[in-house]
Image (cartoon, helix red, strand yellow):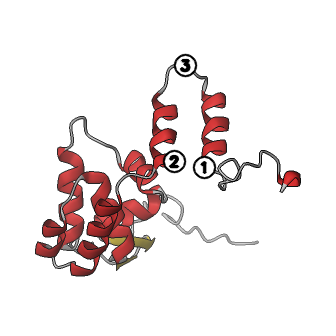
């Protein structure tokens, strides 16, 4: 005779959810708090996606700099501080002044922001923005026109085709 041993409750016990280490997010640095406050105060409010597009870098980069951290894994978060160039470009998009960046402790970014302000708007970027907001073109046409506008200055040098140089 073969005896069977029953293991009761092996499959019926509810497994307790194991909680990993609590992940705390570091506070955003002062310049990041300034950027967020100014962006959210814009009328109409500008999304991080739109702000990143205007600044010329990815949404992920904008988000990480504005939040002040990067989530590497579910259990690992590291503090992030934007480079002076990126913080200055972010400041330009949200309308920060060099003085505000200095007050936030970013003299390096304030100096770059002042140079960007002094340089004035880039004519190519202005034209690209006008095209983006135009209702006279389809989205496909807008993309094609913006690509042409943002290309190297071939047209400004009098050449319409690379082979004519």
Q: Position of residue 90 (x, y in %)?
A: 33, 60
* Residue 154 left/right relative to 17: right
Mark 1–mark 2 contact, CB under 8 Å?
yes
* Image quarter of the C terminus: bottom right
Mark 2–mark 3 contact, CB under 8 Å?
no
Residue pictured at 21% horizontal, 47% vertical: 40
Q: Position of residue 93 (x, y in %)?
A: 32, 53
The residue where tag 3 is placed is 136
Q: Residues within 10 Å of mark 3 (few under 14, many from 20)?
A: few
Q: In front: 86, or 76?
A: 86
User: Is disc 3 placed on a helix, strand or loop?
Assistant: loop
Q: Residues within 10 Å of mark 2 (few under 14, many from 20)?
A: few
Answer with the quarter of the image where residue 35 lies. Answer: bottom left
Q: In front: 72, or 35?
A: 35
Residue pictured at 18% horizontal, 70% vertical: 101
The residue where tag 1 is placed is 150
The answer, for residue 20, to whether it is visible in the render is no
Residue pictured at 68% horizontal, 72% vertical: 3
């Amino acid at each position: 005779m073969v005896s069977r041993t029953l293991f009761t409750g092996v499959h019926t016990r509810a497994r307790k959810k194991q909680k990993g280490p609590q992940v705390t997010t570091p506070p955003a640095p002062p310049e990041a708090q300034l950027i967020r406050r100014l962006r959210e105060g814009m009328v109409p409010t500008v999304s991080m996606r739109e702000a990143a597009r205007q600044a010329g870098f990815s949404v992920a980069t904008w988000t990480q700099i504005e939040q002040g951290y990067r989530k590497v894994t579910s259990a690992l978060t590291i503090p992030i501080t934007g480079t002076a160039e990126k913080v200055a470009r972010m400041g330009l998009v949200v309308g920060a002044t060099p003085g505000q960046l200095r007050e936030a402790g970013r003299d390096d970014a304030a100096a770059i922001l002042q140079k960007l302000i002094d340089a004035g708007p880039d004519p190519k970027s202005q034209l690209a923005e006008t095209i983006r907001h135009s209702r006279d073109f389809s989205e496909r046409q807008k993309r094609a026109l913006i690509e042409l506008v943002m290309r190297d200055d071939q047209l400004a040098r009098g050449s319409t085709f690379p082979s004519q140089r």
